[in-house]
Amino acid sequence: MNTMRRLFTFSSIFVVLFACQSPAPKAPPLAPLKSELQKMERKLCVNDSNCVLLNISYPILVGGNAAVTDTLNNNIQRVYRQVLDMEDKYTQLPFTIMLDSASNALGNVFKQFRAEVPESAITEWTLNASGNVPVLNNRIITVEILSDSYLGGAHPNSAMTITTYDLATGKALGAADFLKDPNAVLPMLEKAYRAEKIFPKTVAYRSSC
């Protein structure tokens, strides 16, 4: 009888202790990924009316998976590095320091060019780069970067970069990642192109493949 009482008491204590244990803490939910626009404006002058103007705006992603967000920010910033760090002199520098260093270097080139070719002062140098995020959902993010510049050459230059990334991995996606049969859209693309350029209609689309 005593053995039964002891066993019952032990079982009761075990049940109470088990019931009073706190559940394992859950990992805090990830903050949603969002885009914040940063800006840098610089005016580097020989005198009050002889300057090179830089206007740079770039998205910074915050939240989400930290490793993926870092990958995405590095991929975005790589485009800006190509625009500003034209000779790859500052590839090892952190992004914001690279912006300052590349801007100062461009200012020095501008001042030297003005000193050597004073008649070039009739034209102003400019360098612009702007980014935005037209698509951001729980699966993908699309980043658009527009740049244009005039740095004393025969004509200005411009470029557009549009890239879509997988939010699970941070990798850039191509058309094949969205289309089961990329060739199936070619007739539609040709039709849209001809409509845009006001080309005559074709009888049928013929693939070169």
Image (cartoon, grey):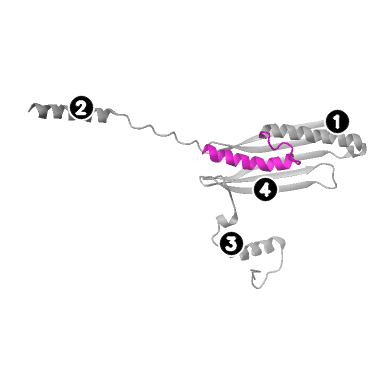
Q: Mark 1 vs mark 2: which is more N-terminal? A: 2
Say which element carries label 1. Answer: strand
Amino acid at dot 2: Ile
* Residue at x 20% of width, y 27% of height: 13
Mark drawn on residue 46 = 1
Image position of 166 (left or right of 107): left
Amino acid at dot 4: Thr
Q: Are marks 1 and 3 in contact (CB under 8 Å)?
A: no
Amino acid at dot 3: Pro
Which residue position holds label 4?
161
Mark drawn on residue 182 = 3
Q: Mark 2 vs mark 3: which is more N-terminal? A: 2
Residue found at the far left of this picture = 1
Which residue position holds label 2?
13
Instruction: Point out the stretch of residues depicted in magenta.
Output: 65-94
Image position of 125 (left or right of 138): right
CA–CA distance in space, label 4 to label 2: 67 Å
